Amino acid sequence: MTVVAFSDVDVLDILVVLAVAVTAVLAVVIPRRVSATIAFLVFGLLLALLWARVAAPDVAIAEAALGGGVAGALLVDALHRRQPDSPQRSRRRTATVTAVGAVLGAVTVAALVTVLSRLTAEPADLGPLALEAVERSGVSHPITAVLLNFRNLDTLLEIAVVVFAAVGAAALSRDRIRPVSDPGPVRRVIAVVIVPALVLLAGWLLVAGTSEPGGAFQAGAVLGAALIIAHLCGVHAARAEGRRALAIVVTGLVAFIMLGAIGLAATGTWLALDLDWAFAAILAIETLLTVSIGMALAMLFLAAGSRDEGSVTDARARAAAAGGAP
Amino acid sequence: MTTLQLFLYAGAFILVLGVVATMLVRDLIRRLIALNVASGGVMLLLLALADRGDGEPDPVPQALVLTGIVVMAAVTGIAIVLARRVERLDDDLEEVEP
Amino acid sequence: MTASSLVLVPVFLPLVVGALSAVLSRRAAATLTVVAAAVTLVTAVLLGIAVLESGPVPLEVAGWAPPVGILLAADGLSVVMIGLSAVAVLAAALVAAADDHFAGGHAFWPLVGAAAAAVNGVFVARDVFTAFVLLELLTIASVALVALGGARSAAAALRYLFVAVTGSLFFLLAVALTYGHTGTVDLARAAERADDTVIVGAIIALTVVGMAAKTALFPLHSWLPVAHPAAPTAVSALLSALVIKASIVILWRVIEYLGPHTDIAAPLATVVGIAGAAAVLWGGILALRRDRLKSIIAYSTVAQVGYMVLLIPLVFAASDPQVAWVGGILITVAHGVAKAAMFLAAGALASAAGTSQLDGLEGTISRMPWTVAAIGLAGVSLAGLPPTLGFVGKWMLVQASLDAGAWWWLALLLGGGLLTFAYTARMVKATFNPPGDFSRARELTRPARTVTIVPLALAAVSVVLGVIPWLLIEVLSAAPMGGGA
């Protein structure tokens, strides 16, 4: 067995990576949904920590907001619905399949490690090129420059992904999102205190993103969380469904494409931003995107997490509780 | 082993772990979790590549990861909606059978 | 307006129309979609003219050149595939507008806009990360479209989602490797800087696996015969005719640019060829054994995917790879047109007869002769018989096989055609009147006239293009694969 020697690797890095790997394994092998989603939630938080360790604070914020949101939605779903019983499979067959999978997986990891070991530790020269071009982008934060200027086509397409996922979720979700009728005093306090605080945080992340870590996605994720919390606390104005919500979601995408057309008219190239108005354009678009993303995420995860009070299952449970045989 | 290699190999492990689990596990929500774990592995790889060298981190892979995280969130959202549809139908079917 | 500014029209126009369709009425959405498809077709023609005059049309998005920015380029392949996409969307939209049952609901319109934008984007992409995001957009739209087929299609849609996203993650790993090794995600620049045969080989291998899953190439095909029949008719047509082409094109592009830079490419190509051969046989045999119309057509797609990847080993083996490229691309286009025709016609037939089981279709031919004719004609193009476009493509692949001395591919091409002919004949025969019973014509509700005309028109297109393929071949040769942008 070869001994793996670590040459000046920070102990903290090893520990965090180890923790991430362990929670990954747990999230994947734990059989009960609720426990698995909790493990996954911890995985996401450790991942955010790891991203901070590799000097990626923007990504860390986004991972915490979005990853936490996704894990939260999965948890709510797992808590509200009974986990279906797994079909009875012969234990031998399951063991064989798992063993085969493990072996194939190990072989694949070994192959990947061989390939990866051939990558150099020299940084790509694209990095300095991009950093140098940031001065001509209209903003001072490099990631914002990449996302909203150099590679803004990718960002536009990614917004489209979020928008059309929300459209799909709206069409496919059978539950009508029920408004919370009597939120109670605790929830009212949350609605008055926490929701505005989150909205302010979203706004700050948005504006800060031009010169520091932050930006439309992080702000959008926080805004989405604010909308979901507001809904759960009975704020009727935060209804993330229906044609009005879709219109808000769609506006961000359409506005971005219009900006592209303006760039075409002004400079002769799609999505090009003239240095004179690049900063204003980027901030304006990011604001619209934040609202769009926030509403879209709220639609997606409220549709995903809405309770099915009217389902047959609950009726059956009530009948069983009343003494009738199922 | 350097820090870069540590991160790269860990990323590869997490990716393969997630993919194998997605294929082998039967429960829909657990498969979805596995898929998200796999995606985390690739993100680790990309961010490790961004942090090479001593200067400022490379913004391009970081931007790519940011995009990837948002995309996976959208995919997961729609997958949950579909999983609910599938599992509710099974529940309803149980009811209908005499 | 320069040709460069046309390059993004096939992407942004359907995207805007799709976004607006989410909030407009059904009629407005349908009209806009049809108009957008027509405009896309015109744009494809204009771009084709530009390509004929001066080669590939590049576009540096946002004014930044790679490696800092994103480069798109329209070459012969792009133009031809965008044309296919416009035609397929137009046909599906017309049928869906005529009868909402074929669409699956109002969400059809925005999701189709997203899907069309995504495939068109893939056809002009030269940047692997942009390709990744486009494929994700396509996956989300397609998965949601499948699920429109009713509560029971949710399982099929979810299965498709898991396979497609897993494939995307493999491809994202390939993107990471590309960036890690070459410092760029632009294919042309990466090819210039690629330096390590193992890493480049791994990139190609990962792309093969990822795209094989998304295109339903044997043995990763099992999600397709479940998903395509479960979807509403117009969606099935688009899925088979268009959506699976996007991942195939990405595979072609990666091989086109990076293939020459690794020794592993040729053996990988052979492996892909074997998978393709297995697909042709497996798909064909299973199509012969199924009893439901849509199932047969779905397995037929599995078989045809085999042909589309067949060009890859031929490109490496032949002395003139252009023949293999052009032949494979033409077969792909022919398949797209024919499959759309088949699914739309089959949907009309099943809807009118009340069942898609073959033995429930007896006698339908006397009431819906044109619909059955569309299926038959489409089958002829798929089988590669003259005078269809399928024949032209197949003929070129045969030439490439002979040139490379690869007798086995030749046998496969011919054998596959026989299978195709057999299952098409089986479908058509099922619609005949019961023997000896000429008097009693089957009582059917005939569908709207559009639904009868559109599939037949599509099938006719494959004949017309088969008789005069010169224009397509010219465009494909003016900006040949491997020429680079």
Image (cartoon, coloured by chain):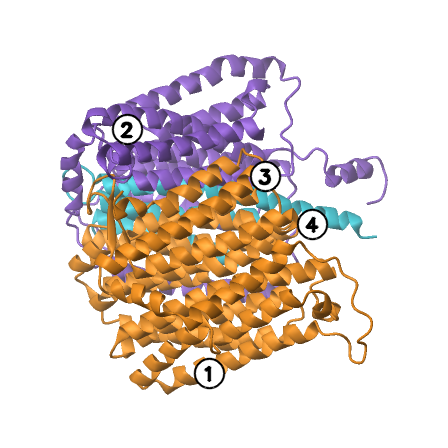
Q: What element carries label 1?
A: helix
Residue denoted by label 3: C26
**Residue type at numbered disc 1:** Leu
Q: What element carries label 4?
A: helix
Q: Residue B31 carries which label?
A: none
Give the alpha-carbon distance from disc 4 to disc 2, as whole Å.
46 Å
Chain B shade = cyan
- Residue A252 shows up from this direction: yes
**Label 2 neighbourhood size at 10 Å, few (<14), some (14-19), many (20+)?**
many
Specify the subunit that label 2 lies on: A
Q: Is residue A292 left or right of residue A185?
A: left
Give the mark toward the camera: 3 or 2: 3
Is A28 or C37 nearer to us in this picture?
C37
Where does residue C218 sit, x and y in percent of width and height?
47, 69
Q: Is mark 3 on a helix, strand or loop?
A: helix
Is A178 or C336 nearer to us in this picture?
C336
Give the alpha-carbon distance from disc 1 to disc 4, as whole Å.
45 Å
**Label 4 neighbourhood size at 10 Å, few (<14), some (14-19), many (20+)?**
some
Q: Residue A213 carries which label?
A: 2
Residue denoted by label 4: B90
Tell me which chain appears orange. Answer: C
Q: What element carries label 2?
A: loop
Give the alpha-carbon distance from disc 3 to disc 4, as whole Å.
32 Å
Chain A shade = purple
Specify the subunit that label 1 lies on: C
**Label 1 neighbourhood size at 10 Å, few (<14), some (14-19), many (20+)?**
some
**Residue type at numbered disc 2:** Pro
Q: Which mark is residue C414?
A: 1
Same chain? Circles 3 and 2: no
Q: Is residue B82 left or right of residue B71?
A: right
Q: Is residue A223 left or right of residue B65?
A: right
